Amino acid sequence: MRFAYEFDWSVLWRHPYGIWILKGLLVTIEVGLLAWIIALILGIFIGTLRITTWRWMRFLGTAYVELFRNIPFIVQLFFWFYAGPMLFGEKLAHQINRIPDLNFYVAIIGLGLYTASRVAEHVRAGFASISRDQYQAVLSTGMTQVQMYRYVIIPYALRIIIPPLTTEFLTIFKNSSVAMTIGLAELTFQSYRIDAVTFHGLEATTGAMFIYLFLGLSVVKFMGLIEKKYKIKGMVGR
Amino acid sequence: MFDAVFRNFSFLMGGLLITFKLAACALAGGIPLGILVGLGRISKNKWIYYPVTYYVNFIRNIPLILVIFWFYFVMPIITGSSIDPFPSAVVSFIVFEATYFGEIFRAGYQSISKDLVNAAFATGLTYSQTVRYITVPIAFRRMMPSLITQSIVTLQDTSLAFVIGLPELVRRASIVDNLEVRSIQLFGFVAITFFIICYTGSKISRYYEEKVRKANIL
């Protein structure tokens, strides 16, 4: 067996590659955080739709979740990036395609819409874990349906589902790597770019792996703090 | 409406075939390795437990695309020659999906209560009979929904082999799109194709879930 490969780990910090990696990490964090905001808001809304008493609203919520979960994320991203502008008609499409950093915005929106469907499922599961008695108790105090969700059920369900939401928050950073396929210069893209210039892709991707690992550990730590802060009194902790 | 799809139909279907092939190879390797990983995760031997646990936690924290790239870079170094993207993709999917299957098998095993095993022994069954007739069938029935769901996820994941140039369905659609510029219908077609396959799969998974629920009530 021939083993003629010479390792050169300096591609991780040597000029200009070190800066490429840092810039990539910054884009990964930006896209992940902004998409997370969309995913949370939309996911909570759709998850709530799925348990309302109005049949058409339930159908809408279910249709959204099924549609976004059953199509690979890369296909969704391609659809939004290449076909998305065309949906607005020929004239507007040209203007949209001229927007600088279009792939950045498409990545955020696409990732947000996709993750929202996953968040919605957790929100629904959270609602399902709240007992009937609690709904009845809230309604008996004279609150309306909307007030019930706004002040009691949603805050309660959100605390219950913090652990699965942690997993989703981790997944959003991992999934942001798919945006390299529409040319977004995030962390994975940069490690691939280093390979294209230096042929030391192995070191670059290995380095990127550990950066993702570190990012993941930070998220777990951060969510652990949130979980502790918003723990429901009297519930058995993990 | 779908004119560009029809003109390149056989080309696109060839891509779908590669997608299926890749998913089949990933499952054929990922599930057996997943069983080993699951056993390692419940092992009492720390020389097995810790390495397997680190492997699972490491892989589950990094993006699949990066794993695909990593093996694409590392395979030529090991074999000493530049390689075809397909085997490299298969290896990365087996290594990646096995960690997810492993966690399913671990959960399935841990869902079997000690009482059940003791009850089986009490009726006079031997150890191997207990495993053969009691624990494995029950654990398998409980794991079935998750196994199907993870298989669907694996099929969806294969589209990421796009990044190393594997000519599967998504790659072929984008090749056609470069020539014909019919993004809406081409990526719409790919989306519908995946949706039909995966939605059917999720319905089957839900059917088994319902069966498990009923079995647990009895």
Image: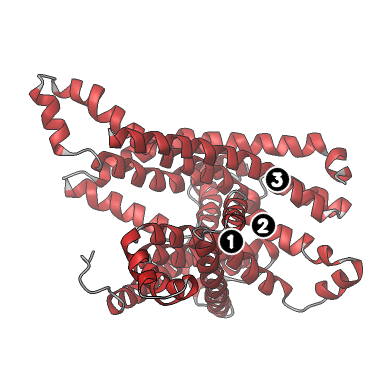
Q: Is residue A102 above or below residue B104?
A: below
Q: Residue at x 64, y 54 (%)?
A: B163
Q: In terms of image quadrants, where is residue A155?
A: bottom left
Q: Work out whether disc 2 and disc 3 sit on a shared chain.
A: no
Name the amino acid, label 2: Gln
Report the residue marked by disc 2: A76
Task: Decide which of tag 2 and tag 1 comes sooner along the chain.
Answer: 2
Label 1 crowding class (10 Å Cα cut-off): few <14, some 14-19, many 20+? Answer: many
Alpha carbon separation for disc pair 2 and 3: 11 Å
Name the amino acid, label 3: Ile
* Mark 2 or mark 3, whichever is nearer to me: 3
- Label 3 is found on which chain of the structure? B
Report the residue marked by disc 3: B192
SS of the residue at dot 3?
A: helix
Q: Position of residue B126 (x, y in %)?
A: 13, 20
Q: Is residue B94 above or below residue B163?
A: above
Label 3 crowding class (10 Å Cα cut-off): few <14, some 14-19, many 20+? Answer: some
Is B167 left, or right, of A133 in this rendering? right
In this view, the residue in front, A179 or B91, is A179
Q: How is the image coloured?
A: secondary structure
Q: Is residue B70 above or below residue B158?
A: below
In the rendered picture of this protein, how many numbered marks are placed on residues?
3
